[in-house]
Image (spheres, rainbow, N blue to C red):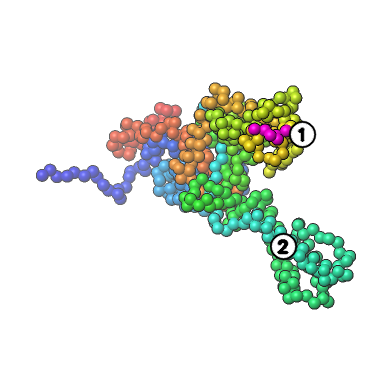
């Protein structure tokens, strides 16, 4: 039987010269991309945040590289980044054998990087744009809801506060009415109080006035109890509601453990019970699957976020995109108006665009306003029976952003005895339609854009661009929930994810296969390899 021969295994073997980490790193490994890209950045803003004095600090460039490479490898926690920096050869090479601990990493990420991160992100996008990997001209915009790192069951609801305040107002009003009936003489000089808007001061004044008026009257115990309860609890509660309303700042909810997070309905509903979860609405622009801009919003709907998201793009790059492609969630009058003002071509769908294109809507709602003929010269519509529907006036309304919309009303002359009456409308009067002419004009332009050759190309590209980016972040990178709390920290967290995503995209174009060149793959004593390495460096220079 032939004797088995094993390769030498001597873990404790000392080496004549220390090994070079560099030769262990693949020539096209993503770690080299991170290293070379970060080396090209102007990090002066980051360096300026260091005050000086005291002991020497870890080099910010090293920490930035380590954190970004951690995010590329789906390592997001500071403890796990610390572990990787100490044990993973790619991190060791990248951080040049420095070993910052998790506290240093966390402090650097939260205090030093956070204020300058958007600038670093911008520089990386511009570098990728120079290389032709991304264009700032055509932007694909969409939003996704990302769960916050907050307790799902400690919530504050704006509607509950409103209802409770209404109940308190009603109760005070009842007590006030009662006092007026039993102490008419004492209260004859008091003026009427509006209990629809109440605060702690108004409650105190009201209760004092009632107590003064009924002090000598025989009062039922129940009334006395209600008055005492209002005196003791209402001012405290109202002060608490005031603080909560300030935190809500127009929202309908927030989580007590992350007050910037709003409760939203999520697509990921594993319990299938429609449970609302504390989350942030993440708005992202992409081109060629490279993230070019990101913003965090507290409102669950995408419609109201577009203007400020495009404004932040313009502020970041000093230029507006030439085209915007987005789904029907963004097809509002305000957004169309904004994009027209900015001279951005909008490939933005409106509600029912697809139904309209397939002719479903016309079949389903043949009498709908959009299918009636409009005569712009006479400013009138023609109803399905051929009657003229005349302009009977206009009115304006404002949306949640304060944007003003004008609606014009047109009414049919006589709907009595019309054979189409039941199919045409349900009103007991002659049919009235409300028309938003400005929105109709924008829809007409959007329809022409979306059905043009260019529009079809952008519509095909949109899901492959922005939706694939969300898919990559949520599925491949496993990033489905923020780890930090508060809008600012969450923005930093996503900024790092966006940078990691973009650098991974750049790295994927290069491939990662060329691990060690052929000469290095041969077994050579370390001393020979070091000489070869030195020789390579000299000849390359
Ligand atoms: S119901 Fe009135 S609006 Fe409708 S088709 Fe008849 S006349 Fe015209």
Q: Residues within 10 Å of mark 1 (few under 14, many from 20)?
A: few
Which quadrant of the rendered structure holds the C terminus?
Answer: top left
Q: Secondary structure at mark 1?
A: strand
Measuring 56% from the left and 25% from the top, which residue is drawn there? Answer: 451
Q: Which residues are magenta?
A: 414-419
Give the mark, 2 or 1, whose residue is nearer the N terminus: 2
Quadrant of the rendered image containing residue 118? top right
The reply, left or right, for residue 186 in relation to residue 352 is right
Q: Position of residue 376 (x, y in %)?
A: 72, 25
Query: Depth check: 516 or 372 in front?
Result: 372
Nearer to me, 440 or 92 = 440
Decide if ligand 1 comes within 8 Å of the CB at mark 1. Answer: no
Q: Label 1: which residue?
A: 392
Asked whether 208 or 106 is in front, the reply is 208
Whether label 2 touches label 1, CB < 8 Å: no
Residue drawn at the location 32% of the way across and 32% of the way down? 519
Kindly identify the residue that appears in the image at 63 percent across and 29 percent down. Answer: 371
Q: Residues within 10 Å of mark 2 (few under 14, many from 20)?
A: some
- Disc 2 is placed on an element classified as helix
Gap between marks 2 and 1 measured at Cα: 43 Å
Say above or below: 472 vs 162.
above
Left or right of 490? Residue 521 is left
**Overall secondary structure of the magenta stretch?**
loop
Residue 106 among those drawn in magenta? no
Residue 153 found in image quarter: bottom right
Magenta segment includes 415? yes
Please tell me which residue lies in front, 296 or 205. 205
Q: In this rendering, does residue 177 appear at all?
A: yes
Which residue in the structure is indicated by mark 2? Answer: 168
Q: Quadrant of the N terminus?
A: top left
């Amino acid at each position: 039987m032939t004797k088995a021969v094993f390769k030498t295994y001597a873990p404790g073997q000392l080496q004549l010269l220390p090994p070079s980490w560099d030769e262990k790193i693949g020539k096209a490994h993503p770690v080299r991309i991170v290293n070379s890209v970060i080396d090209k950045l102007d990090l002066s803003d980051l360096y300026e945040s260091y005050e000086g004095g005291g002991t020497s600090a870890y080099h910010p460039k090293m920490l930035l590289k380590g954190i970004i490479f951690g995010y590329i490898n789906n390592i997001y926690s500071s403890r796990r980044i610390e572990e990787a920096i100490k044990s993973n050869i790619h991190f060791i090479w990248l951080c040049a054998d420095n070993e910052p601990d998790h506290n240093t990493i966390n402090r650097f990420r939260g205090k030093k990087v956070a204020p300058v991160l958007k600038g670093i992100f911008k520089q990386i996008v511009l570098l990728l744009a120079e290389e032709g990997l991304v264009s700032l001209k055509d932007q694909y915009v969409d939003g996704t809801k990302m769960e916050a790192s907050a307790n799902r069951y400690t919530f504050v609801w704006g509607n509950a506060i409103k209802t409770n305040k209404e109940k308190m107002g009603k109760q005070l009003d009842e007590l006030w009415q009662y006092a007026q009936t039993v102490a008419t003489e004492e209260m004859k000089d008091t003026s009427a109080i509006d209990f629809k808007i109440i605060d702690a001061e108004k409650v105190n004044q009201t209760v004092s006035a009632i107590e003064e008026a009924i002090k000598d009257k025989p009062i039922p115990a129940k009334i006395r109890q209600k008055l005492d309860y209002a005196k003791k609890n209402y001012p405290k509660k109202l002060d608490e509601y005031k603080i909560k309303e300030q935190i809500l700042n127009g929202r309908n909810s927030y989580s007590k453990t992350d007050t910037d997070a709003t409760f939203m309905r999520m697509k990921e509903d594993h319990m299938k019970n429609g449970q609302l979860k504390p989350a942030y609405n993440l708005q992202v622009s992409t081109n060629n699957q490279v993230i070019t801009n990101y913003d965090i919003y507290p409102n669950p709907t995408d419609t109201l976020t577009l203007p400020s998201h495009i404004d932040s793009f313009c502020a970041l790059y000093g230029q507006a995109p030439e085209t915007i492609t987005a789904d029907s969630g963004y097809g509002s009058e305000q957004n169309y108006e904004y994009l027209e003002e900015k001279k951005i071509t909008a490939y933005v769908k409106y509600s029912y665009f697809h139904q309209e294109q397939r002719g479903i809507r016309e079949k389903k709602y043949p009498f709908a306003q959009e299918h009636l003929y409009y005569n712009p010269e006479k400013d009138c519509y023609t109803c399905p029976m051929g009657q003229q529907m005349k302009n009977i006036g206009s009115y304006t309304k404002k949306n949640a952003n304060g944007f003003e919309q004008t609606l014009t009303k047109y009414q049919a002359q006589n709907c009595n005895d019309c054979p189409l009456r039941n199919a045409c409308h349900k009103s007991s009067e002659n049919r009235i339609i409300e028309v938003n002419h400005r929105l109709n004009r924008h829809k007409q332009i959007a329809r022409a854009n979306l059905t043009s050759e260019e529009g079809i190309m952008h519509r095909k590209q949109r899901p492959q661009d922005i939706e694939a980016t969300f898919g990559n972040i949520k599925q491949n990178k496993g990033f489905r929930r923020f780890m930090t709390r508060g809008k600012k920290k969450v923005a930093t967290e996503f900024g790092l994810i966006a940078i990691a995503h973009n650098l991974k995209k750049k790295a994927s174009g290069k491939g990662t296969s060329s691990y060690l060149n052929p000469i290095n793959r041969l077994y050579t004593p370390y001393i020979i390899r070091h000489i070869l390495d030195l020789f390579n460096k000299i000849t390359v220079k």
